[in-house]
Image (tube, rainbow, N blue to C red):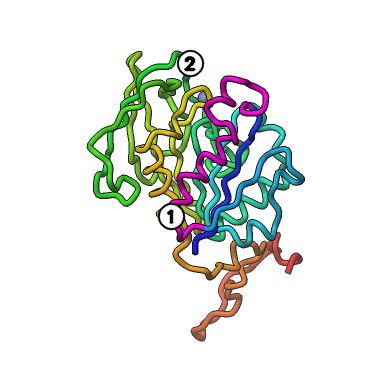
């Protein structure tokens, strides 16, 4: 079984009647519904205004993949939550960041850049081109697919160069955008997928659903073991004594981690 947590800010669907019509139970439950067809997935949801943002150490320890949707209240996410999620990603948990999650604290933390982009909310047609038809995340898709109404995201998208770009988008207004990006941080696989503006029924689109489903299966950890050094100020695997018999040359000064063992 793959344990999945779908994390959603869950504010637009509560505050805005039009958004509520599209996602009556929230974006998280819409995603849960189409993922639930895969009986190998054990799915939980969590939202911003639950205690500790609906997440804690135990939930994350047992989580293989977390999906993240946020937009207007990124700042309300606790720094302690970001620390926990980052830690699990470094250990090997998969992370799927959707749409406006590009500005979430966790994505910016993991990217190390401002993750800014250009945007326009005109309900434009988006055409997504598949860059690598042989990649597992693109399985079952035609060479391109279209979303009738979306918010435009345009370049420059200020993220580090990805390990692989799986989708590029074209918008009716003329812009293009790198809309499916893969990264690895520590042992964790991260997939950023652009579509998903709250005012349009994007997560009801079967091609979008396919990508999210494929992504969950791709970014999940392939091993249960955790590399302990990820959490240690001094690497546990550090070898102060050489394995061969050699004479020390030169001199040493104090090392900043020496007293923290
Ligand atoms: Zn949006």
Q: Is mark 2 within 8 Å of ligand 1?
A: yes
Residue marked by disc 1: 38
Above or below for 52 versus 226: above
Question: What residue do we see at 61% from left, 75% from top?
Answer: 240
Relative to residue 39, is residue 103 drawn left or right? right
CB-based contact (under 8 Å), mark 1 and mark 2: no
Percent x, y for residue 105? 62, 38
Q: Is mark 1 within 8 Å of ligand 1?
A: no
Q: Which mark is residue 18?
A: none
Percent x, y for residue 156? 42, 24
Residue extending furthest toward the bottom:
245
- Decide whether the magenta segment is chiefly helix, strand or loop: helix
- Residues packed near mark 2 inside 10 Å, few (<14), some (14 to 19) or many (20 plus): few
Question: Which region shows up in magenta?
Answer: 12-41
Question: What residue do we see at 62% from left, 55% from top?
Answer: 87
Q: Given this view, does label 1 or label 2 mark the residue nearer the observer?
A: 1
Which image quadrant for residue 68?
A: top right
Percent x, y for residue 42? 54, 58
Residue marked by disc 2: 121
Q: Is residue 14 magenta?
A: yes
Q: Compare marks 1 and 2 and give the one earlier in the sequence.
A: 1
Looking at the rendered image, the quarter that the C terminus falls into is bottom right
Q: CA distance from mark 1 to mark 2?
A: 33 Å
Question: What residue do we see at 54% from left, 80% from top?
Answer: 242
Comparing 221 with 107, the one in front is: 221
Q: Is residue 18 magenta?
A: yes
| Secondary structure category for the residue under label 1 | loop
| Secondary structure category for the residue under label 2 | strand
């Amino acid at each position: 079984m793959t344990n999945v947590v779908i994390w959603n800010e869950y504010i637009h669907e509560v505050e805005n009647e039009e958004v509520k019509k599209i996602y009556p139970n929230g974006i998280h439950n819409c995603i849960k519904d189409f993922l639930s067809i895969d009986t190998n997935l054990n799915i939980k949801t969590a939202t911003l205004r639950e205690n500790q943002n609906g997440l804690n150490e135990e939930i994350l320890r047992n989580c293989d993949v977390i999906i993240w949707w946020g937009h207007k209240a990124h700042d309300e996410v606790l720094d302690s939550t970001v620390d926990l999620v980052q830690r699990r990603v470094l250990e090997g948990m998969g992370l799927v960041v959707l749409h406006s999650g590009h500005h979430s604290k966790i994505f910016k933390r993991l990217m190390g850049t401002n993750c800014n982009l250009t945007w326009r909310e005109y309900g434009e047609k988006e055409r997504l081109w598949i860059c690598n038809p042989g990649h597992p995340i693109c399985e079952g898709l035609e060479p391109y697919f279209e979303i009738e109404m979306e918010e435009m995201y345009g370049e420059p998208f200020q993220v580090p160069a990805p390990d692989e770009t799986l989708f590029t988008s074209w918008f009716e207004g003329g812009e293009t955008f790198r809309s499916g990006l893969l990264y690895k941080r520590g042992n964790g696989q991260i997939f950023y997928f652009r579509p998903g503006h709250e005012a349009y029924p994007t997560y009801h689109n079967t091609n979008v659903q396919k990508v999210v489903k494929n992504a969950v299966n791709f970014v999940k950890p392939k091993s249960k073991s955790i590399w302990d050094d990820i959490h240690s100020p001094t690497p546990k695997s550090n070898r102060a004594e050489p394995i061969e018999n050699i004479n020390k040359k030169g001199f040493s000064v104090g090392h900043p981690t020496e007293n923290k063992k």
